[in-house]
Image: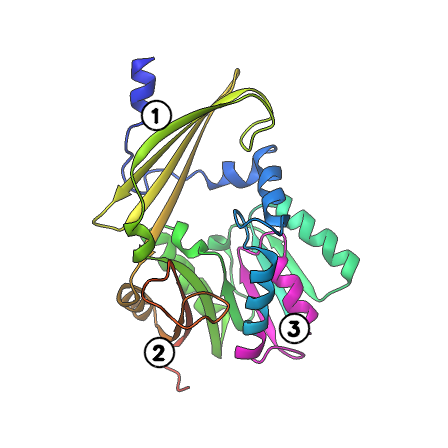
Amino acid sequence: MFEQLNKITEKPDIYSCYTAEALWNDPYISKQMLKNHLNPSVDIASRKSDFIDASVNFIHNRFNLGEGKAVIDFGCGPGLYTTCLAQLGCKVRGLDFSKNSIDYARTELERLGLDIEYLNLNYLDYQAQETFDLVTMIYCDYCVLSDDQRKTLLKIMKNSMKYNGHIFMDVCSNRMYENIEEGTAFELIVKDGFWSAQRHYVFKSTFKYDINRVSLEKYTIFENDRNIEILNWLKYFTINELSNEFEENGMEILEVYSDVRGTPYDITSDIIAVVLGRKDTSY
């Protein structure tokens, strides 16, 4: 027992393991994730519906979206943004490796008859065959990736963007990192919890990696017949760090906001939203 508890609370090396597939494609857990995506009153997997409406309105006006415009959404989930963008008249493509989310999005697509193409794949494996006016990645998906993965993603996103196109994304700020506290907690769930339908224990350990400004939420779930370990990594940025990372990959920050609703930037914000363009293009 003592050795097992030591393992549960042990701090892993940074980016030593990824468990996203288990989180998004486990038969039970993925259904819970989808429920949270579709619940308009919580912002666990997607932001609340009023926030999404406001951000779509901002995106519509800022990027002059409508008939004849094309948008690709990286990490589209069940299509909350792609559906709204297609309803504006855009041609839309959504990428996500959660089969559960993509299946739901495709069902909605058939019901609404919109111009959307959904691809069920890891966006790090996506090969751009055509370019888009706008490339989006919303709800800080960029922050869950390692340094190498972000470099790979930026190359893919740049190849997916028209010469005069834009990228719009949000990330976690350094301000958010400063408010994180390390520690371990556990609880007993009798049934129908987020992680399991049966009786189970959940241990949550939170770690910080100050040099890299990365946090880890490490969940260890004990059921009667199996154990599950989920590692949720998050990278936090300053604007200067973001700018340097984008410039190293041939892009530059054109505008900065406090969120994807276009809220004016505030240094105290937990979120940084940026509009990117190619470095070699005049705007």
Between residue 33 and residue 267, name the one nearer to us: 267
- Other residues around mark 3 within 10 Å, as few (<14) / some (14–19) / many (≥20): many
Image spot of residue 112 (x, y percent): 77, 61
Left or right of 209 in this view: 53: right
**Mark 2 or 3 closer to N-term?**
3
Between residue 250 and residue 32, name the one nearer to us: 32
Which quarter of the rendered picture does the N terminus lie within?
top left
Q: CA distance from mark 1 to mark 3?
A: 47 Å
The amino acid type, in three-letter code, at marker 3 is: Cys
Specify whether residue 166 is painted magenta.
Answer: no
| Residue 90 circle label | 3
Whether pointer 1 and pointer 3 mark residues with C-beta atoms closer than 8 Å, the reply is no
| Residue 8 circle label | 1
Left or right of 58 in this view: 143: left
Q: Nearer the viewer, mark 2 or mark 1?
A: 1
- Write the start and end of the magenta stretch as one range: 60-89
**Mark 2 or 1 closer to N-term?**
1
